[in-house]
Amino acid sequence: MMATPAISIQNVTKIYPIPFKREKVTAVSDLSLTVEPGQVYGLLGPNGSGKSTTMKIVLGLVSPTSGKTEIFGRDSTTVESREDVGFLPENPYFYKYLTGEETLHFYGKLCGLSGAKIRERAKELLKLVGLENAANRRLAGYSKGMLQRIGLAQAMIQEPRLLVLDEPTAGVDPAGSREIRDLILDFKKRGITVLLCSHLLEQVQEICDRIGILHRGALIREGKLEDLISIQDQTELILENATPELLSELQAVIANSSARLLDQRKPQKTLERYFLDVTGPQP
Amino acid sequence: MTAAPAATKHKLFSPARVSAIASNTLLELVRLKVFYFMLLFALLIIGSSAFTSKFSFQEQFQVLKDVSLGAMSIFTWLLAVLATAMLLPKDIEDRTLYTILAKPVPRFEYLLGKFLGVLFLLFIAISLMSAVFVVVLYTREQTALAEASRGVPPNLLTDEIRQIRASAFNSNLLPGIVIIYLKAALCAALTLLLSTFASSWIFTIITSVVVYLIGHIQPIAREAYLASATVAPLTKIFLALVSLLIPDLTALSLVDDIVVGNAIPMLLFAKTAALGGIYVCFYFLVGYFVFSGKEL
């Protein structure tokens, strides 16, 4: 028996009328996609491609003009479906006068959790997102990265099975961005489904199992990441401690075969890895 | 920590969720330092009593009640409009509204929580203003009593004391203050309704002020029009609609009666309170209707 999809979007179209004009804007056009439980799904696309509208439809903040969306089998326009969802919007500003801990208590109460459960979850999540020492500080004094992490904690307060994250690392420095990425990978290990919208393609490549590319409201590509980006007729070999003799031998073997050596070079670190190595804690 | 195995049963209406939103809204509003209004109020009524020291005690009490209840009415109205107008736009701009509505929180509960937060704020504000008013009134009463005991012949003193006490405090004060509160609540509900579809909080405030003014002049305009024999049927319909949608705010005030010392019949108080209550519910429900269909 197939598991119920975490998200099921079926033929969704969203058309916005333009006030005082006869024209209409199609934000999403006949979109269908499925996110299976436990997947990290990356929704990509340029600005105005319909990513945010799609997310809002999934969260019930916007109603589709036609089509249907479900979260774990429940119609996503119903309030009940949101018991299974945690959401972190892009650049969120939570109530600045609340401390980190009070923020989690507030969202815990909205989810109907008991006082004891909220205290337990808040403690656990503050530790998980590395904000234990800032738990009693007001959010007004939090850095951008800390706000994103408290945002992730509030999204997780009721132990949802699905996390919807809109640009979770926007405006965060590389170290903070890395921490958030590690948290998402940690959620994935725990079996939590993640729907991620991001412009940072490198990051999406690192953490997503599957991606969908939206362009002008339509899904133009969709599939497993490795299937979409691997070049089928090429093979990469990365050798360690290869002697010049061995490399010459390999080149000779290749020259005698039908294959063609396209490139031979030293692998490089990403700039991000290099930056983190030089700015991170020294051994 | 693991992912939740399955969703729990969702409560259709949860007082706990509403109270979480209401108390957070109250905290949000209190942090905007709205209680500076109170300081102004205290200065105004203490100052007004200083100017009336040469009047008779009846006149002093009348002026004090007139100024205090009038100021209470204006300040609670201003507080209601300014505090309510920014609630929704701020939550939308900061995207906190998304994080709240992405939780299992029905829009009705969100809006009710916000509104109750404003009502709590108005309650605290009017209670503080009433307390300042009662203290100043009591002080003036004690001064008048002390002056009477010094200057009035002993055979007339009992009568004089009775008159001073009757002019200072009477049972009309509380219903009057309740009606001022209801009027402010009505203006808050109206402002909340406007903010559910307004594109900016400035528009909300201006429209709310305009409606407030119409509410005060509409009975005069309506009577003038209806008294004329040449009123077109269409005008009549328009006036009927305006008087239905915008309450006669002059009817929502008992201050004049209180100042001159007229007794307020229980029935008049009940009718006035019911009128205010009905409009509060009406505006709130229309606001919810608009908000429930709003694309966020």
Image (cartoon, rainbow, N blue to C red):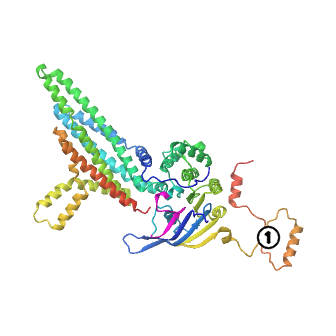
Return the residue found at the far left.
B229
Residue B278 lies left or right of residue A223; in this view the side is left
Q: Position of residue A262 (x, y in %)?
A: 77, 75
Specify whether residue A187 is painted magenta.
Answer: no
Q: Is residue B138 above or below residue A75?
A: above
Residue A17 lies left or right of residue A247; in this view the side is left
Q: Position of residue B154 (x, y in %)?
A: 13, 19
The quarter of the rendered structure image containing the N terminus of chain A is bottom right
Q: Residue at x 28, y 46 (%)?
A: B182
Residue bounds of the magenta highlight:
A65-80
Residue A177 lies left or right of residue B118; in this view the side is right
Amino acid under disc 1: Gln
Q: Position of residue B73 (x, y in %)?
A: 27, 44
Name the residue nearer the viewer: A14 or B10: B10
| Figure quadrant of residue B120 | top left
Whether residue B204 is visible to the viewer of this picture, yes or no, is no
What residue is shown with label 1?
A: A264
Return the residue found at the far front.
A1
Q: Position of residue A169 (x, y in %)?
A: 59, 57
